[in-house]
Amino acid sequence: MVSVVIPTYSRAHVLGRAIQSVLNQTYQDFELIVVDDGSSDNTEEVVRNFTDPRIHYRRHEENRGAAAARNTGIEASRGDYVAFLDSDCEWLPEKLLKQMEVFGKVSLRVGVVYTDLWSISKDGMRRYWHSSRVVPEDGIVYEHLIGDQLTGISMPSVVIRRECFARVGMLDEGFPRLIDRDLYIRLSKHFYFYHIAEPLLNHYGPGEGISSDDRLLIKAQKLILEKYHDDIAKNRQSLARHQYAIGSLLCQNGEMDQGRDYLLEAIRLYPLSAKYLIAAILSLFGEKAYNKVVKLKRRIRHVPGP
């Protein structure tokens, strides 16, 4: 059985879509645990409107955050596998079936099976999100993760063997964001990841919640660097990437002096990167100029090919 955990906070208007996408799965051996993280809307009513006995409702009396909500779901679950779905996402019908077929034929060392996804903007535009590919044949999985080379594995795309949590622990509730990244780093020390190169869920956004708060992202990036510093520092290029990521985010949010310090440290660690040097020079021209270049870079990156 797969235990599906949906953490939600005041998203009653989209929660029904997420729940229905689980019920529509061609793989039907599951239970669904909806964890209401202190919502102030009619979230409970939406859940109660579904009469399927496999659906269970848990509620936090106050908002405790996504990691705590997911941990509550894991603790309440009974399945041999755990899957996560955000309340503003939806699974395509064959998602669980294809992932469970993989678990049925791979080594027990594969602890995580994840997929690609469709990223759907507010105006309805769909973009194929290719998750990073790390399979057992790649060998040293952990170095990929701490090196920040394995990013973009969406938590709603993963199914995880239950035994993985017994081995590496639960989600770290001290992280305001990058909760998934922290978990993946710990998992990758002991288990392989298997990638299904097919989009099997729709991710809608960006929204206005925690995932859009850059201040929390900066805090989380710093926590990752602090928590895994000794491992990251084994590779100067990897450490430089982390310094650059924090520095660039700080500059994008107007913390130019502090951001420049991180960018200069990235240059010191890896002086061959023109990107780091350009970012440091741009930081001298202020927040507006820095963000203008960042937005232009993103626009170019997302232009469809021929």
Image (tube, rainbow, N blue to C red):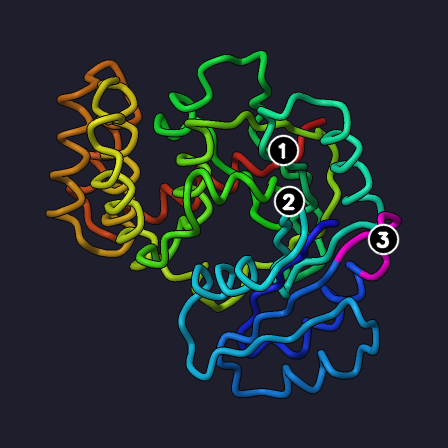
Q: Where's residue 282, x and y in %? A: 23, 38
Q: Is residue 292 above or below residue 40?
A: above
Element at label 2: helix
Element at label 3: loop
Q: Which residues are magenta?
A: 23-30
Of the two numbered discs 1 and 3 on the same chain, state the one appearing first in sequence: 3
Residue for badge 2: 157
Give the crowd class for mark 3: few <14, some 14-19, many >=20 residues within 10 Å. Answer: few
Residue shown at the point (24%, 52%) measured from the top left: 287
Residue for badge 3: 28
Callout 3 amino acid: Gln
Q: Is residue 186 left or right of residue 222?
A: right
Residue shown at the point (42%, 77%) measured from the top left: 63
Real-space Cα separation, disc 3 to disc 2, in angstroms: 17 Å
Element at label 1: loop
Observer-side mark, 1 or 2, equals 2
